[in-house]
Structure formats: structure tokens, C-alpha cells
Image (cartoon, grey):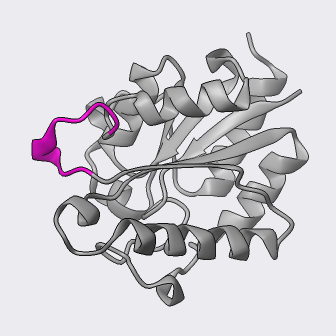
């Protein structure tokens, strides 16, 4: 059975470098490859939904964001992993756009493009905005305690699951797919 896992990028899959624009600085977080491989082996299809306000702030270009994402795709492909759906919001928080998380537009596009129903989808990220985007799209959300997630007070973060790393998040998602009740 296919299911969709939408990931935030910085602090979730790769080390957050604060407005990353250099593809040579892409650094996969520990355990990410293993977690992704476990998910893929169980039918997961992957998407990326990332706020990239550095574009709107004039810190880097759309092209730089694409090059960084291409580097991430290449690193994942070297481990036998596919990331077919990539979305990013170039706007700043003051732009009040529809695509910036916690708004669900990028996630809804991933659902539409992948043809996977939201009941078989998860949003995984390290910020409350990621969790809320998942909830706003009607899917389950996971807060990773990596990146900014290590500093968040999880008492009322509204995540369906809080995971120390991507491997434990993968175990939870697989359990939910195999035992949907």
C-alpha cells in the first residue's frame, strides 16, 4: 500500500544552516537515510514542503533554492531513495501568502500530485508550523525533536506524534499504516 510522507527540509532531513543557499552545505541529519529507507520499503512516497523566506528577503534566488534541493535529491538517490515531489514557499511571513506553512497549500498540492488520499498521509517537521500545516491539510503530523524541534515545548504542540528522530517517526508511521484502526 502506498502512503505519502511530506517532509520539511531544514532541521528535518538536513542540518539547518539558516538560509541555506550553498548546495555544498547540504548535510543529512543522522538516521535520516535509514528512516527513509525503512519508509520506502513499506510503500512510502516522499514529498518536500519547505518555507524558504530567504528568497523573499533577498538573501538568495529561486535558482539557489532549486540547486540546494537538487543536491538533496542527488544525495538521496545515491542511497536508492526518490523524492519526486518538491514544493517551497519563497515568501516572508509578512506576505501572508497561501503557500507558507502553516497554511496547507503545499501539502494539498502534494496530495493532489501524488494521488494519495490524506488519510494515508503524514507531515513531518521540526517546527510548530509544520505540525499545523499537516493538521490544516487534514493529515497526521509528526514533530521531530531535531532542528528547532529540540527546543519546542511539546505540551500543546498538537502533533499526533513526537519523535526523537526520523527512525522512530518511521516506526510510528509504519505502525499506523499497518494498523489503521
Q: Which residues are magenta?
A: 91-99
Q: Position of residue 100 (x, y in %)?
A: 31, 40
Q: Is residue 96 magenta?
A: yes
What number of labels is visible? 0
Which residue occupies the extreme left position in the image?
Answer: 94
Residue name at image x 87 percent, y 41 percent: 42
Q: Quadrant of the N terminus?
A: top right
Residue name at image x 31 percent, y 34 percent: 102
- Please tell me which residue lies in front, 1 or 179: 1
Q: Is residue 153 magenta?
A: no
Q: Position of residue 21 (x, y in %)?
A: 38, 78
Q: Position of residue 86 (x, y in %)?
A: 57, 51
Which residue occupies the extreme top position in the image?
Answer: 181
Q: Quadrant of the C terminus?
A: top right
Residue 99 vertical position relative to residue 8 in the rendered view, above or below: above
Tell whether 124 sits left or right of 112. left
Tell whether 157 sits left or right of 81. left
Q: Position of residue 74 (x, y in %)?
A: 71, 74
Amino acid at each position: 500500500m502506498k502512503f505519502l510522507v511530506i517532509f520539511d527540509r531544514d532541521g528535518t532531513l538536513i542540518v539547518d544552516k539558516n538560509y541555506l543557499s550553498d548546495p555544498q552545505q547540504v548535510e543529512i541529519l543522522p538516521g535520516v537515510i535509514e528512516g527513509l529507507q525503512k519508509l520506502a520499503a513499506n510503500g512510502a512516497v516522499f514529498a518536500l514542503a519547505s518555507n524558504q523566506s530567504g528568497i523573499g528577503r533577498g538573501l538568495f534566488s529561486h535558482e539557489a533554492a532549486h540547486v540546494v534541493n537538487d543536491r538533496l535529491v542527488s544525495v538521496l538517490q545515491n542511497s536508492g531513495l526518490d523524492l519526486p515531489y518538491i514544493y517551497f514557499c519563497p515568501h516572508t511571513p509578512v506576505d501572508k501568502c497561501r503557500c507558507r506553512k502553516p497554511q496547507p497549500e503545499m501539502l494539498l498540492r502534494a496530495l493532489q500530485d501524488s494521488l494519495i488520499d490524506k488519510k494515508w498521509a503524514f507531515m513531518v517537521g521540526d517546527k510548530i508550523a509544520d505540525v499545523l500545516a499537516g493538521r490544516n491539510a487534514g493529515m497526521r503530523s509528526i514533530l521531530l525533536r531535531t532542528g528547532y524541534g529540540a527546543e519546542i515545548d511539546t505540551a500543546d504542540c498538537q502533533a499526533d506524534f513526537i519523535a526523537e528522530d526520523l527512525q522512530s517517526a518511521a516506526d510510528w508511521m509504519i505502525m499506523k499504516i499497518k494498523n489503521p484502526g
